[in-house]
Amino acid sequence: MTNTSWTRQHVLSLADFTVAEYDTVLQTAASFKEVLSRRTKKVPTLQGQVVTNLFFEPSTRTRSSFEIAAKRLSADTLNFTASSSSLTKGETILDTAKTYLALGTDLMVIRHREAGVPQAIATEMDRLGVKVGVLNAGDGQHEHPSQALLDLFTICTLLDRDRPRLELLSGKKIAIVGDILHSRVARSNIWSLTASGAEVHLAASPTLLPHLFADYIKNEIHKNPILNRQLFLHWQIEPALEKADFVMTLRLQKERMTQHLLPSLREYHQLFGIKRDRLQLCQPHVKILHPGPVNRGVEISSDLMDDPNFSLIQEQVTSGVAVRMALLYLMGSGKA
Ligand code: ASP
């Protein structure tokens, strides 16, 4: 496995990812997917390196996925949980990060409920002149790059199992539906999917896709020469679903809602829920993604979520391990 084109020390956002970087991640992840299908699902690539999961906010999938990915690469892993840490005694986040640096950390995977914390830690590591790679595992409403990369990998491997690559999405229609305003997953996916040349359609109520926010996103897209700019916004679900090849539905981020933005969960499901009759608007081969955790019967009907003919949700979790192995490998192997 070669990674000659990889120069990125930190992965904090996908806003400036290049096509070559996407393809490197996708192809590296495909190799690791093959490793994961073997009887012995482990390679010695990061032997002797320490991967630390610094999760200041709860997580099931992302945290376990990074942990198993690091273990499959033979790295040593450290796990930090905010509630049982010295943060409760007044230690600052940067001091916590520096403590893990002193313990020998080579790669830090960081989740925080505030946007910008992984960037702040990366800046501090750079200032200290240490070669520690920082990976953003979700910061507030800002970004969740590894989730968008695993979504991309899940879709691209469906289109070409052996050679997943960005160009496969060119001309495909992808709908992102739901709580776009509060979703870091949506934001990272907007960068990767618009970079691929797919037609990206966002759909939500005006409370979850406010016009000001929509203008901001459009503006960002138009400023960025890497992106293909095929972004469409809708305040009803139907035009987004019409002839869609893929539908991503997002969790209602109730923990981030400071106002009453929904009439009721029942009405939300009626207006924006993904359910069987709505799928008739999409392509017959349509597939549904959800980053999880899912509010069953709210973003998506329970029966559809469990239907393997449509749902890629379990596949996304499995893909996540290969993609996170790829990221840890690419960021860590430079020092190996
Ligand atoms: N697991 C994803 C995240 O951490 C999506 C979600 O929580 O809804 O952003």
Image (cartoon, rainbow, N blue to C red):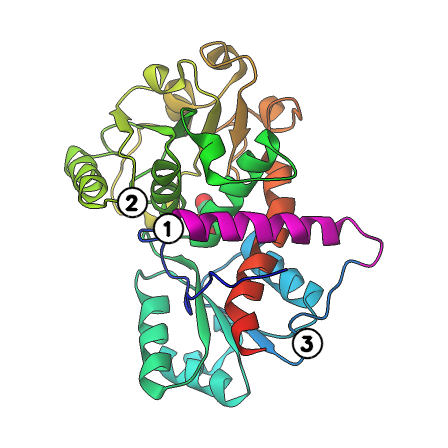
**Is ligand 1 less than 8 Å from the beta carbon at label 3?**
no
Q: Element under label 2?
A: loop
- The residue identified by callout 2 is 226
- Quick one: quadrant of the C terminus? bottom right
Q: Which residue is found at the position 52% from the left and 73% from the top?
A: 334
Q: Is residue 276 above or below residue 131?
A: above
Asked if the magenta segment contains residue 21, the reply would be yes
Give yes or no for contact between labels 1 and 2 (Cβ–Cβ under 8 Å): yes
Q: Is residue 92 above or below residue 302?
A: below
Query: Which circle marks residue 149 in the picture?
Result: none
Query: Which circle marks residue 18 in the picture?
Result: 1
Find residue 325 and report its image quarter.
bottom right
- Residue 300's x, y, as percent? 51, 27
Q: Which residue is found at the position 19% from the left and 39% from the top?
A: 222
Distance (Cα) linking label 1 and label 2: 7 Å
Sequence-earlier tag: 1 or 3: 1
Q: Element under label 3?
A: loop
Q: Amino acid at mark 2?
A: Ile
Query: Is residue 53 visible to the viewer in this orientation of the structure?
Result: no
Residue extent of the magenta highlight: 18-40
